[in-house]
Image (spheres, helix red, strand yellow):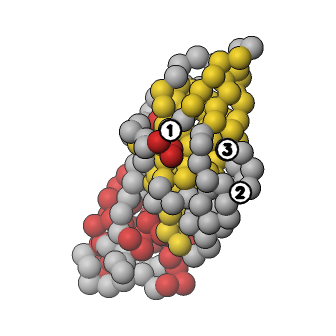
Amino acid sequence: MNYVTGNLIRTLREKEKMTQRELAEKLCISDKTISKWETDKGLPDIGILEELAKVLKISVTDLFTGEYRQNDNVSANMQKQHFYVCPICGNVVTAIGLGSYSCCGVNLFEQEISFEADEQHKVMIETMDGEYYVSVQHPMDKKHYISFIAYLTSDGVELKKQYPQQEASANFKKKGHGVICLFCNHHGMFGVRV
């Protein structure tokens, strides 16, 4: 496992427009300690990491990995939604930008949408009375199932949870162009543009 790097601390401190002394004052330590960290001659004590992360406006996880991820998606188009799904409990995390998330003690990875579905994951859409009726012919048992179906438009995300031993289908009020996608707990995300 990587640990906090001096370069990351310096980069984040400068991003917040703080001197080494100002950062040290916020953490109630000496500026010489900050200098040692930034030149990789020492490491922050584990007891100070949470406060350091808070002051530098980064997650403790990102401090540990030594990575800083910045959201470059300033337009916030909801069709560019990122999905993270816990393989243990099925919890779904959605975010407009990339991030670091964990659940049940496991780091979550982004689920990329494939627009090339096989027959088992082919999304079928019917339009009725101003709504999309979405369905998929897919096994829905406790080991292999569709976890959710979502409708992404430029200004919103509507997600419908699916449950094993029920039909995989959902209704969405038609809101214009977007993406309808589904998540298979074995094969990941599949989608179709509407």
- The residue under label 2 is 164
Calculate the distance from the C-alpha at mark 3 to the C-alpha at mark 1: 12 Å
Q: Amino acid at mark 2?
A: Pro
Q: Amino acid at mark 3?
A: Ala
Q: Is residue 117 visible?
A: yes
Badge 1 vs badge 2, beta-carbon distance below 8 Å: no
Q: Is residue 161 above or below residue 106?
A: above
- The residue under label 3 is 168
The earlier-in-sequence mark between 1 and 2 is 1
Q: Is residue 24 above or below residue 163?
A: below
Identify which residue is drawn at 64% across, 32% down: 134
Task: Spot the residue most to the top.
Answer: 129
Badge 3 vs badge 2, beta-carbon distance below 8 Å: no
Identify the secondary structure beneath mark 3: loop
- Dot 3, how many residues are within 10 Å of its Cα: few (below 14), some (14-19), or many (20+)? many
In percent of width and height, residue 48 lies at 52, 79
- Dot 2, how many residues are within 10 Å of its Cα: few (below 14), some (14-19), or many (20+)? some
Calculate the distance from the C-alpha at mark 1 to the C-alpha at mark 2: 18 Å
Q: Is residue 95 visible?
A: no
Identify the secondary structure beneath mark 1: loop
The earlier-in-sequence mark between 3 and 1 is 1
Q: Is residue 135 above or below residue 138?
A: above
Calculate the distance from the C-alpha at mark 3 to the C-alpha at mark 2: 9 Å
Identify which residue is drawn at 60% across, 40% down: 136
Identify the image quadrant of the N terminus: bottom left
Identify which residue is drawn at 56% across, 66% down: 87
Q: Amino acid at mark 1?
A: Lys
- The residue under label 1 is 122
